Amino acid sequence: MSKRQRDITLRFLAEPSDVNFGGKVHGGAAMKWIDLAAYACAAGWSGKYCITAYAGGIRFVRPIHVGNLVEVNAKVIYTGSSSMHIAIDVQANDPKELTNRLTTHCIVIMVAVDEDGKPSTVPEWVPISEDDIALRESAIRLMNMRKHIGDEMEAHVKYLK
């Protein structure tokens, strides 16, 4: 694959089947959309089948209403040897007004795999702009924080057995 796609935007209308008991689009629907966009972004960058390894820091900022036009923006912000950190922003608007508002954001880590399901190398993403350098540095800080959180979670698992 010679051309790499670093970012992607998925767009669709929120449907009545996406509604929770409170009348808004439920978080599970937004998480599904996030996973779809992360996959499309990671596959576009790596040229390979990718699996979700981590989804974290999900912030539900504002509700999404049925009938809203939803945009899920995904962008590679860091690459490891086989992993890609994907920043996701979900925005929504009334299609008659077209004023986007942030509803959800998070980081998803996708891993490229080969035909046997084993991790496979991905092209390195090298930031050039100041904004991209800041995004990469943020991804590295978050990766380090996740290591500490993982250690704490292991302690909980030990005591729950």
Image (cartoon, grey):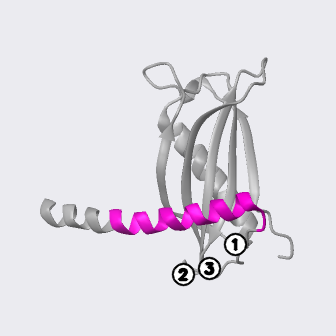
Q: Name the residue under label 2.
A: 118
Residue sitting nearer the eye, 50 or 98: 98
Instruction: Specify the quadrant that holds the N terminus.
Output: bottom right
Image: 72 above or below 128: above
- Note whether 118 is above or below 26 in the view shown: below
Q: Which residue is drawn at 69% across and 56% down?
A: 75
Point out the tag, 1 or 2, that comes first from the N-terminus.
Answer: 1
Query: Which numbered disc covers residue 48?
Result: 1
In what element is the residue under mark 1?
loop
- Type of residue at label 3? Glu
- Give 40 or 61, whichever is nearer the viewer: 61
Give the residue drawn at x 62%, y 79%. 115
The CA span between labels 1 and 2 is 12 Å
Dot 3, how many residues are within 10 Å of its Cα: few (below 14), some (14-19), or many (20+)? few
**Left or right: 157, with 139 as reference point:** left
- Residue at 56% x, 80% y is 119
Which residue occupies the foreground of this view, 134 or 84? 134
> Which residue was labeled with disc 3?
115
What is the spatial separation of the Cα atoms under label 1 and label 3, in whole angstroms? 10 Å
Residue 27: x and y, percent? 48, 36
Q: Is residue 58 magenta?
A: no
Q: Earlier in the sequence, mark 1 or mark 3?
A: 1
Residue 61 location (% of width, % of height) = 52, 33
Q: What stretch is highlighted in magenta?
A: 128-149
- Disc 1 marks a residue whose amino acid type is Lys
Query: Mark 3: which secondary structure?
Result: loop
Specify the principal SS of the magenta part: helix
The picture places residue 152, in percent across and down from the top left corner, at: 26, 64
Mark 1, other Cα within 10 Å: few <14 / some 14–19 / many ≥20: some
